[in-house]
Each structure stands twice: as structure tokens, then as C-alpha cells.
Image (cartoon, rainbow, N blue to C red):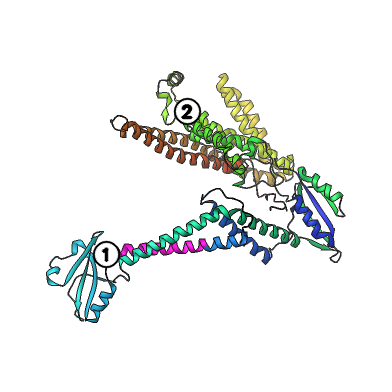
Amino acid sequence: MIVPMHKFSFLVYHQDYPGFLDHVREIGVVHLIEKQQEVSEGVREKTDHIRQIQSVVKSLLKRNAGQPVNIGNVDGEKAFEEVTALFAKQEERFQQLNLLDKEISQVKPWGDFSRETIDRLAEQNLYIKFFNIPTSRFDQQWLEEFPIEVIGYHAGQTYFVLIQQGDEEPALDAEEVRPPERPLTELLYYRKELRAELKQLASLLDKHAVNSLEAIKKYGYEIKESVDYQTAIENTKEEAAGKAMLLEGWVPSEKIDELLTYLDASPVIYLEQEASKEDKAPILLKNKKFAKKFEMLGDLYSLPKYSELDLTPFFAPFYVLFFGFCLGDAGYGILMAAAALIMKPKVKKELRQVMGLIFYLGVSTFFFGVISGVFFGIPLFETGLPVYRTLAVRFEQQGTDINMLLFYLSLALGAIQIIFGMILKAINETRQFGWKHAVGTMGWILLVTGGISLFAISEITGIAMEKLNPVLYTLLGVSGVMILLLNNMNRNVLMNFGVGLWNTYNMVTGILGDLLSYIRLFALGISSAILGFVFNSLAIEMSGSIPVLNIVIMVIILVIGHGINLFMSGLGAFVHPMRLTFVEFYKNAGFAGGGKQYNPFKKIT
């Protein structure tokens, strides 16, 4: 759900204003309303500097040099400058090493030589010419006709030199190449020196990753605080010829009490009012334990507008089901759930939500693995296990199998989510604009659910659809009027009819396409099972027949193969349900989005 916001307007005497800002920042609950359209140059420069600091912190975190420690006497600014210089120098050395490696690869076929000797020969009117030519074109007779020495062979090329006296040009059908600038030994020496320097730079950076990381973070927080303070000043409006300062901001309803306690005891004049649907209030989500783990997924797309529903608790159960459907291996599910439970107490606090999410996804994967009969790529329906053997026989008698049932299940889940999304759309429209704007959506819900219900009644009871025609015609008539004529009761009928026809075309083609998109759930589940089965087969076929060794080889192939499958299939199971959520579900739910994250003015050091 979206936490209700209250708008506060503060009027403060100009001499008391710095102290007021300090108190507001200390309380840390007010999201300031930005009135200034353009960011000042000072704020822009500091913001860019913060990004640089964040980049350095991220790079240091990747080094895994040890647990960072908080050393109080480390100067964060100085450490940041030193680390920035080290990274720049490291990047420069890496570029030099890449160029040097290319030069070595070009010089290597020529081996080692003395540049001084070549220069002394040139003084005696003897010139060393360098050639290379495809080996198939090299004429062995040249060795007898010309003063030629073959240096070596590489990549189908023959490398040789010709000693030329004076300006006489030999009649060789070969192209002369530019002689190397430096001999191989010199290049190898420089490469060794570069690698040693890079190792030293890496050691210094590792040391900073342990000793300076916290100080650099604190330095970044201090810059961020100064930016926030300067932004607050720039968004303050002067009143009464500069004698009074006006500041406005948003406060979540659950965080008002501490602010009111301070305001009631201070000489600040303030006005409080609850945010309306039309206000562009910031968004703070508050969901229960299960849905809260999925807020990070919703943030990847967009936050809802203040007047909208928060769809997080509504898409969360579907996402869990869809992930399990896509991965669909009971063995993988056990691994994921166990890994999440083991890692949750050991990871940082901000990652515990991720571990909780992985646990739920693992449970769903295990559940669908049991249904589809797959355990680490083993097709359980073919193993003869009691329950699966009975089910396989029953499916065969009915002329179907588990894969066909899973295919229909993917479509059924898609239909349920689409209809559920339409219901949420009607609620959203009623919430934002009133029930008169939601009549058209209600008509579509009536038509779709009513049509499915009539078909189900006919199939279950055996009543022919012809006998249900009166009900069907009534359903078509009522829903048709709602869709075509009453879709927006604030417009005239002719306008509604035109809009209704266009919406009908979009709905008919859109719902069909949306429904077919859910087949990907079945397809991904099948592909995961097939890949697991293939790796099992490879492990058996390639293990050989040598006792003990064959078991070792089999285990290695199984671990590597199922690791690859778990990664690839898990990635697909993560992405595709998200795509179904953000495209099919959000569209049918009428989600607009575009909300701004609640970001209070507060101290962070």
C-alpha cells in the first residue's frame, strides 16, 4: 500500500531559519517540495562529485580484500583523491600493457635482435630488410639466390630477413614490412615491470578497500548532506521582504508525531493538510512481510502515482507461481530454499529481503517440480515411482499427459491474472476518477467472466450451449451497452460509441496476444527439464567404466551441468515472469506509474 502523505507549509523568521533547518534535518521525515526548476551550478557540481565517490566505493567493494574497518583518523577526502589517482594510474597501465602485448605478438616471430648492430651495418652500407610471406608462396630457391635468413614460421607465414648492399633492390616477389622498433627481450622486460607495478597498485587499492572505504563513504555522505542543505535553501521562498522564510514538504502520516512535537514547541508557523489525489506527493510503500520482498522488483519498472493502487501485493503471488512454473525442478527448488535459509543470517541486513525472496521462489520451484515430475532433470513420471506411475497410467487412459496439462495450466494462470488485472483497473479508475469512468472496464469484466462461466456450466453439467443462449444474449446486451455506450458517463453517447469501438478492437486483439504470452511459462519449464535430462545423459555416457573414477567424472559433469542449467533457467525464470508482470498484468490493470520516491531531508552521517 501507499502510505498517506501530509503536506506541510512552514513559515519561519529569517534569523531562526538555519536552526529550523537543522532541527528538520535531525528529525529526518520531511520530503522537501522542489520549487526551483533548474539545479544551480554548485549543486550540479557536487552531485557529479557524489557520483564519482559512489563509483569509487563500488569499485572498492568489488575487490573483496577483507572486511572494511572504520579507522577514525583516515581523511575521507584525501583517501578518495588517492584512490582516484590509483585507479587512473591502474587504467593507464592496463592500456599500456594491452598495447605492449600487441607489440610483443607482432615482434615474437622475429625473435630477439640488436638494434645497435643493425644501425652499425647500415653505416657500412649493409641494410637488413624484413619480409614476411605466406609459407605456401615462399620459394626455397631464394635461399640460394639471395642473402636470405629465415627467422621463423608463425600462423602460416614465413618470416625472413634479407641483407642488402647499397641501393640495389632484389627481385623478390615478397612485401617488405616495417622492422620492429624494439627487440623481444626489451619488450618482455617492460611487460614484467608493468605487471609488477600493476600488482603493487592492486595491493595499495586492496589496502584502501579495507582501511579507507568507510571514510570515503562518510565523505560522500557529508557531500550529500551539503547538497541537500543547499537544495533546501534554494527551494525556500522569501516572504515579507525577506523577514520570513517559506518552506514546503511532504511527511508520511505515520511519521508526523515527532515533527508535530517539535513544531508545537517552536515559534514556527505551519499549515498541515492531507494530500489529495491530484497532488504529486512522493511515494512511500508499506507492505506486509511477504509482499515487501517484491517491492524491489516493482521499483525496477516504476513507482505508482499517489492516486493509484500499489500493485506489489497483487503481482507478488503470481510472480512466485510463475517463477516456479518456469524453473519447475524440485531439486533446484530444494537447493534454492536451503541456500536462502543458510545465507540469510550471514548476509548484510539490506540483503536479507533478497534471501527471503529467493526462499519463496525456491519453495515455488519445488512445488512445480513435484507437479511436473522433475527432480534434477530426472523425469519422475518415467521412473515407476508409485504415485507417478498411477498418475501416468490415468493420464494415458484419458489420452493426455502431464505436459499437455501444464500447457493448459499456463493459459489458465494467464487468464486468471488478466481478469484479476481488469478488476484492479476498475478499482483504480473508481479510486481516481469515480465509478462513472469504470463502467466500460466493468462491462469487459462482466463479458469475460460471464462467458467463461457459461462455458464452464455447459461443460460440467452437460447442458448444451444452445439452451443457454438467452443468458448469453442477455450477457452480450448488458456488457455491450456498458462497453459501447456507457464507458464514460461524463461524455455524450456518440463519443462513447466511437471510443468503445476502438477499445473493443484493442481489447479483442490485446487479450488474445496477452493470453498467448503466458505459454512461455510452459515452454521455459520444458526447456529447463530437457536441459537437466541432457546433462544427466551426458554424465552417464561420458563417465566411462573405470571403477571409482567413473563416479568422480559423473559427479563433476553433473555439478557443472546442473550449475549451468540452474543459472540459465533461473535467469529466464526471473526475467520472463517480470515481463509478464510489467507488460501484460500492468497493462490490464491500467497502471500508469511515474511516482517519485519518498526521499526525506535528513542527516546521514
Q: Amino acid at mark 1?
A: Gly
- Circle 1 residues within 10 Å: few <14, some 14–19, many ≥20: few
Relative to the observer, which residue lies in front, 423 or 267?
Answer: 267
Q: Mark 1 or mark 2: which comes first in sequence? A: 1
Q: Is residue 190 placed above or below 251 in the rendered structure? A: below
- Indicate the position of residue 23 as horizontal and vertical percent values: 79, 53
**Is residue 463 visible to the viewer in this orientation of the structure?**
no
What residue would you read off at disc 1? 111
Image depth: mark 1 or mark 2 in front: 1
Q: Number of marks in the image?
A: 2
Gap between marks 1 and 2, in whole Å? 63 Å
Q: Is residue 408 above or below residue 264?
A: above
Query: In the image, which residues are magenta?
Result: 86-108
**Quarter occupied by residue 394:** top left
Vertical order, 528 against 104 (above or below):
above
Q: From the viewer's perspective, is residue 424 above or below residue 394? A: below
Q: Residue at x 16, y 72 (%)?
A: 147
Horizontal side of 40 relative to 324 (left or right) equals: right
Q: Amino acid at mark 2?
A: Ser
Q: Is residue 197 at all visible to an observer of this figure?
A: yes
Tell me the residue that label 2 is attached to.
372
Name which residue lies at 44% across and 34% down.
526
**Front-lying residue, 548 or 32:** 548
Q: Residue at x 61, y 27 (%)?
A: 453
- x and y percent of residue 317 in the render? 60, 34
Q: Residue at coordinates 79% horizontally, 60% vertically from top-left?
A: 18
Q: Is 341 on the left or on the right of 393, as rendered?
A: right
Q: Nearer the viewer, residue 219 or 99?
A: 219
Q: Is residue 554 magenta?
A: no
- Residue 594 x/y as whole percent: 65, 50
| Magenta segment, prevailing SS (helix, strand or loop) | helix
Q: Quadrant of the N terminus?
A: top right
